[in-house]
């Protein structure tokens, strides 16, 4: 009996020790992550948080996702469904070391009142990497919606009217970033994977501001070593000169606009530009290039060696807008929206011009998209 009593006491002491060690680690993570989030809030908005966010413990997060069977993968962002206080949520774990999750928490908290930003419910700071908890949305990334042709909702969600609305909604969120903080915040990684389309409402919601940077007070640009972003969406001026401005985001958004028009991926477009302009390429070389493009997609890197500058203009060349538009758009409307498609393509060209000074500011882009959307609605009314 004495032996068993001692064994139980020893076992209890070991469990108690392990539990204490775990609590200490969670406390240390809480202090480290908490101070980092506070530092970001102070830098971005003088520490004033517009929307209070809730704090969750590590135990609450574990319990919330314990029975989770579904997840949403958005490039380098991975979210699983969970249940907190009997309501569904999306729980995001940071999977990329170069993402600044603390900045993401600070910025998203300031923008969660916007319908075009995935609302942040709260966060947990007790893990090695902070965890973000969002409102639950039954949705799909804009990337999957555009390029996974077997999606059943694709045709209805990607009508021309809906594409215009998505473009305007994303532009409005970028405009808030550029104008409503103490200094402009530059997203640096605008792309379809960072946009979720709500299956029920069709509303576009931006997620992930972890690569964002704020411009210095009173300055219109920032120059720093190293470039962050994704192949094909990175402003060439930023890539080659390491200059960050508001026009950096305008270029990336222009690429997103172009993909909405064509229904083609950046990699399809670059591949076509390369194949059209390169001669005497044997089959083996072509395979190597395909493998290169695949690796870029998987690794989400911008350390690229083969990058055709101004590839939008080179893709278009003398083509008619009706030749490059997504056939889904033309099946629905046809020739009656040709003028609007030409206006839209003209906006794409302005946004993606090589020199940043020649691009419009996002506020002008948003206004033009609003105008186009109103014109399209008026046209649709006359046809009904």
Image: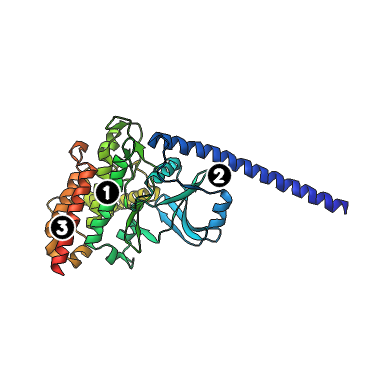
Furthest residue in direction top, as rendered: 218
x, y percentage for residue 265? 28, 54
Q: In the displayed structure, would residue 339 be above or below residue 10?
A: below
Q: Nearer the N terminus, badge 1 or badge 2?
A: 2
The residue that appears at 14% across and 61% down in the rendered structure is 337
Check contact, mark 3 vs mark 2: CB within 8 A. Answer: no
Front residue (pair 226, 200): 200
| Residue 161 picture quarter | bottom left
Residue 203 badge? none
Mark 1–mark 3 distance (CA, rounded to whole Å): 18 Å
Q: Quadrant of residue 40?
A: top left
* Marks 3, 2: nearer the viewer: 3
Q: How far apart are labels 3 and 2 at the CA level?
A: 51 Å
The mark that comes first in sequence, 1 or 3, is 1
Which residue was labeled with disc 2? Answer: 126
Left or right of residue 196: residue 11: right
Residue wearing tag 1: 171
Residue 307 visible in image = no
Quickly name the residue at label 3: 375
Q: Residue furthest right?
A: 1
The image shows residue 169 at horizontal and vertical percentages of 28, 52
In the rendering, at what x and y percent does residue 83 appear? 51, 59
Q: SS for tag 1?
A: helix
- Quadrant the C terminus occupies: bottom left
**Given contact means CB atoms under 8 Å apart, are the residues at marks 1 and 3 in contact?**
no
**Is residue 34 toward the left or the right of residue 16 in the image?**
left
Query: Is 216 drawn above or below residue 236 in the view shown?
Result: above
Pick the quarter of the image with the N terminus. bottom right
């Amino acid at each position: 009996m004495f032996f068993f009593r001692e064994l139980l006491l020893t076992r209890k002491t070991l469990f108690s020790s392990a539990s204490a060690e775990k609590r200490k680690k969670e406390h240390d993570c809480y202090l480290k992550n908490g101070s980092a989030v506070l530092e970001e809030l102070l830098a971005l908005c003088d520490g004033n948080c517009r929307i209070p966010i809730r704090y969750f413990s590590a135990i609450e997060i574990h319990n919330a996702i314990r029975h989770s069977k579904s997840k949403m993968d958005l490039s380098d962002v991975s979210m699983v469904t969970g249940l907190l206080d009997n309501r569904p949520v999306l729980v995001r774990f940071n999977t990329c070391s170069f993402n600044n999750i603390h900045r993401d928490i600070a910025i998203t908290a300031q923008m969660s009142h916007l319908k075009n930003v995935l609302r942040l419910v709260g966060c947990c700071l007790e893990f090695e990497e902070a965890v973000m908890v969002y409102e639950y949305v039954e949705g799909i990334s804009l990337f999957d919606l555009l390029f996974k042709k077997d999606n059943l909702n694709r045709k209805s969600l990607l009508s021309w009217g809906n594409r215009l609305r998505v473009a305007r909604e994303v532009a409005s969120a970028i405009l808030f970033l550029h104008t409503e903080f103490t200094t402009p915040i530059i997203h640096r990684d605008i792309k379809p994977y960072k946009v979720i389309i709500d299956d029920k409402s069709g509303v576009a919601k931006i997620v992930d501001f972890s690569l964002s940077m704020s411009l210095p007070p009173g300055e219109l640009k920032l120059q720093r070593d190293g470039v962050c972003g994704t192949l094909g969406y990175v402003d060439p001026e930023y890539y080659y000169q390491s200059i960050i401005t508001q026009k950096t985001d305008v270029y990336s958004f222009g690429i997103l606009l172009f993909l909405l028009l064509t229904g083609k991926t950046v990699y399809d477009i670059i591949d076509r530009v390369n194949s059209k302009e390169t001669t005497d390429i044997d089959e083996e070389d072509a395979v190597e290039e395909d493998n290169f493009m695949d690796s870029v997609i998987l690794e989400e890197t911008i350390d690229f060696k083969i990058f055709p500058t101004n590839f939008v203009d080179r893709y278009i060349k003398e083509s008619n807008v009706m030749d490059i538009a997504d056939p889904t758009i033309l099946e629905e409307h046809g020739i009656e929206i040709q003028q609007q498609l030409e206006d839209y393509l003209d906006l794409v060209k302005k946004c993606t011009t090589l020199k940043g000074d020649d691009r419009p500011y996002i506020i002008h882009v948003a206004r033009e998209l609003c105008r186009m959307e109103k014109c399209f609605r008026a046209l649709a009314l006359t046809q009904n």
